[in-house]
Image (cartoon, rainbow, N blue to C red):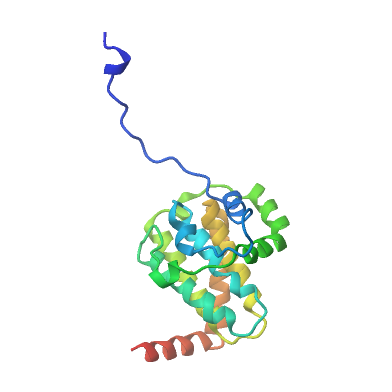
């Protein structure tokens, strides 16, 4: 009979799901020097399934700053980067060096989280990994990326009083990615499509803005 030392090692199975949801997010920004700057490259380095969700959560912060143009100038390009990478099937975010070396101050994130702490903790009890077919397969992953791109374009448009609305929509996208919750993601798809149809295509602003940006870039 073989001794325990001589037994073959078990074959490695699929990687287990790591809880990188809302609780991880809250813990990440909870302790430390409020003046310390949290670099995006450091924030995302050790995350696995939820890296896009955390990246999106950080990217939408300027959308809740009541200054004209800040959301479109800062959040818009970051969300476009996230959406484009998901659309083309990337499973982890790639950050250009100048983006990886930037990030919010810990105190800024802490104040933002303090404002939404109650609803966030209630959502933590409701959300859970489910309906993975609306998250993991490439078509679903890519469709989410496309809707993030369209919502980022809406956020960049000069539509009065919509920063918080689109910011909240993107916050729900980030929570669905964080918690791997396909039910919330389905609701996000419906809400984002409705927003694009109502605010973008009905007024023609989304089409004209997209054409303007295309001409500027090319």
Of residue 116 and residue 164, the one placed in the foreground of this image is: 116
Which quadrant of the figure contains the C terminus? bottom left
Which quadrant of the figure contains the N terminus? top left
Residue 39 placement, left or right of 122: left
Outermost residue, top side: 1
Figure check: 134 above or below 3: below
- Residue at (60, 52) in percent of width and height: 22
Figure check: 58 above or below 24: below
- Residue 166 on image: x %, y %: 60, 73
Figure check: 26 above or below 158: above
Image quadrant in which you'd find residue 175: bottom right
- Residue 190 on image: x %, y %: 56, 66
Residue 119 placement, left or right of 52: right
- Residue at (54, 81) in percent of width and height: 72
- Residue at (73, 56) in percent of width and height: 118
- Residue 23 on image: x %, y %: 61, 49
- Residue at (65, 82) in percent of width and height: 67
- Residue 126 on image: x %, y %: 65, 49
Of residue 164 and residue 44, the one placed in the foreground of this image is: 44
**Count of marks overlaid on the render:** 0
């Amino acid at each position: 009979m073989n001794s325990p030392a001589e037994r073959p090692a078990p074959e490695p199975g699929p990687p287990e799901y790591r809880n990188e949801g809302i609780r991880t997010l809250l813990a990440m920004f909870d302790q430390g020097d409020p003046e310390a700057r949290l670099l995006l490259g450091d924030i995302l380095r050790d995350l696995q399934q939820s890296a896009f969700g955390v990246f999106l959560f950080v990217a939408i912060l300027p959308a809740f700053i009541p200054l004209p143009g800040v959301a479109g100038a800062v959040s818009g390009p970051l969300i476009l980067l996230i959406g484009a990478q998901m659309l083309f099937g990337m499973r982890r975010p790639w950050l250009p060096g100048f983006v990886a070396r930037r990030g919010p101050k810990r105190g800024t994130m802490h104040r933002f989280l303090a404002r939404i702490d109650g609803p966030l903790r209630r959502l933590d009890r409701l959300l859970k990994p489910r309906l993975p077919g609306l998250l993991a397969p490439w078509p679903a992953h890519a469709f989410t990326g496309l809707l993030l791109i369209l919502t980022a374009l809406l956020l960049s448009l000069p539509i009065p009083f919509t920063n918080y609305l689109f910011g909240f929509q993107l916050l729900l996208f980030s929570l669905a990615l964080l918690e791997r919750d396909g039910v919330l993601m389905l609701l996000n798809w419906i809400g984002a499509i409705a927003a694009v149809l109502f605010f973008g295509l009905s007024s023609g602003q989304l089409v004209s803005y997209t054409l303007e940006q295309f001409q500027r870039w090319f």
